[in-house]
């Protein structure tokens, strides 16, 4: 196949699959080496941007995916009624940050860092497909290990985990302060919910 045919095939594959496709899979399908395929896709990415198309190709940790451009979202929602992204609370963002930087990590390790129970938040992040089970720790009870997903990269618009900003001590201290506030708020709620012993 010539370059035009190769690009047309890549376009068809990315459009049809709808998810990120690894370079090696594209290379096998097109019977070409990975460097050639990577170069072709990146050239397509530049051309898509230059031509102001409604779609673009993004690179996600060694894979490529065809997506609708973000500024087309409003037009799409009017036609397809696509729901907006999940809104993450501060607590969810803090928990997700810990997982992103410490992965793979167990639920207990997350709770040690935050200082509070994280069952509900971890379950929500799994439900949102931002984290997933990444095996089990070789320790008593074989606790589940959690790691971020490809959707996490897509959600925050980063190509790979290497693009995460460096986490400084000030940010870590903020996490701890927020966790302490959360604990205090829960204790106060529990105290208010306790039945009174006074006899009317």
Image: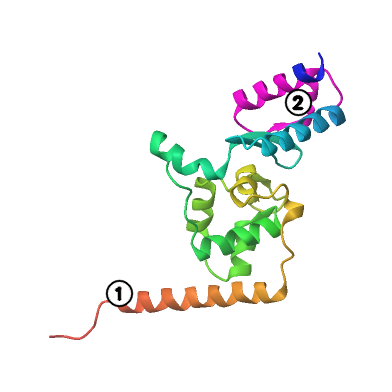
Separation of marks 1 and 2 at Cα, in angstroms:
57 Å
| Disc 1: which residue | 193
| Tally of numbered discs | 2
* Residue 176: quarter of image: bottom right
Residue farthest to the front, as pictured: 51
Rendered residue at 24%/81% (across/down): 196
The chief SS type of the magenta part is: helix
**How packed is label 1: few (under 14 Cα within 10 Å), some, or many (20 or more)?**
few
Rendered residue at 70%/54% (across/down): 103
Q: Is residue 157 above or below residue 43?
A: below
- Locate residue 50, reporting x and y percent: 69, 38
- Locate residue 200, reporting x and y percent: 12, 85
- Residue interval drawn in magenta: 6-33
Residue 9: which numbered mark, if any? none
Does the segment drawn in magenta span residue 23?
yes
- Locate residue 127, reporting x and y percent: 50, 46
Q: Is residue 75 above or below residue 99?
A: above
- Locate residue 25, reporting x and y percent: 75, 25
Rendered residue at 62%/68% (across/down): 112
Q: Is residue 177 above or below residue 129?
A: below
Does the segment drawn in magenta span residue 40?
no
| Disc 2: which residue | 25
In this view of the protein, which residue sits in the foreground, 35 or 39?
39
**How packed is label 2: few (under 14 Cα within 10 Å), some, or many (20 or more)?**
few
Instruction: Provide the secondary structure element on which disc 2 rests.
Output: helix
User: Counting residues from the N terminus, which is met first, the one under dot 1 or under dot 2?
Assistant: 2
Q: Are marks 1 and 2 in contact (CB under 8 Å)?
A: no
In this view of the protein, which residue sits in the foreground, 191 or 156?
156
Instruction: Provide the secondary structure element on which disc 1 rests.
Output: helix
Residue farthest to the top, as pictured: 1
In this view of the protein, which residue sits in the foreground, 48 or 13?
48
Q: Is residue 22 left or right of residue 97?
A: right
């Amino acid at each position: 196949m010539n370059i035009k045919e190769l690009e047309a095939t890549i376009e068809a594959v990315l459009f049809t699959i709808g998810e990120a496709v690894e370079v090696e899979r594209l290379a096998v399908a097109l019977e070409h080496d990975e460097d050639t395929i990577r170069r072709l896709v990146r050239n397509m990415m530049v051309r898509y941007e230059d031509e102001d198309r409604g779609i673009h190709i993004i690179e996600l940790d060694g894979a490529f995916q065809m997506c609708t451009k973000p500024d087309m979202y409003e037009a799409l929602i009017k036609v397809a009624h696509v729901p907006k992204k999940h809104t993450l609370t501060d607590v969810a963002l803090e928990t997700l940050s810990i997982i992103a930087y410490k992965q793979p990590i167990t639920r207990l390790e997350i709770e040690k860092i935050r200082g509070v129970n994280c069952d509900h938040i971890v379950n929500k992040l799994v439900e949102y497909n931002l984290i997933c089970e990444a095996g089990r720790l070789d320790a008593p009870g074989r606790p589940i290990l959690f790691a971020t997903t490809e959707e996490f990269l897509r959600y925050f618009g980063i190509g790979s985990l290497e693009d995460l900003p460096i986490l400084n001590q000030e940010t870590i201290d903020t996490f701890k302060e927020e966790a302490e506030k959360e604990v205090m708020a829960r204790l106060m709620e529990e105290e208010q919910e306790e039945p009174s012993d006074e006899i009317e």
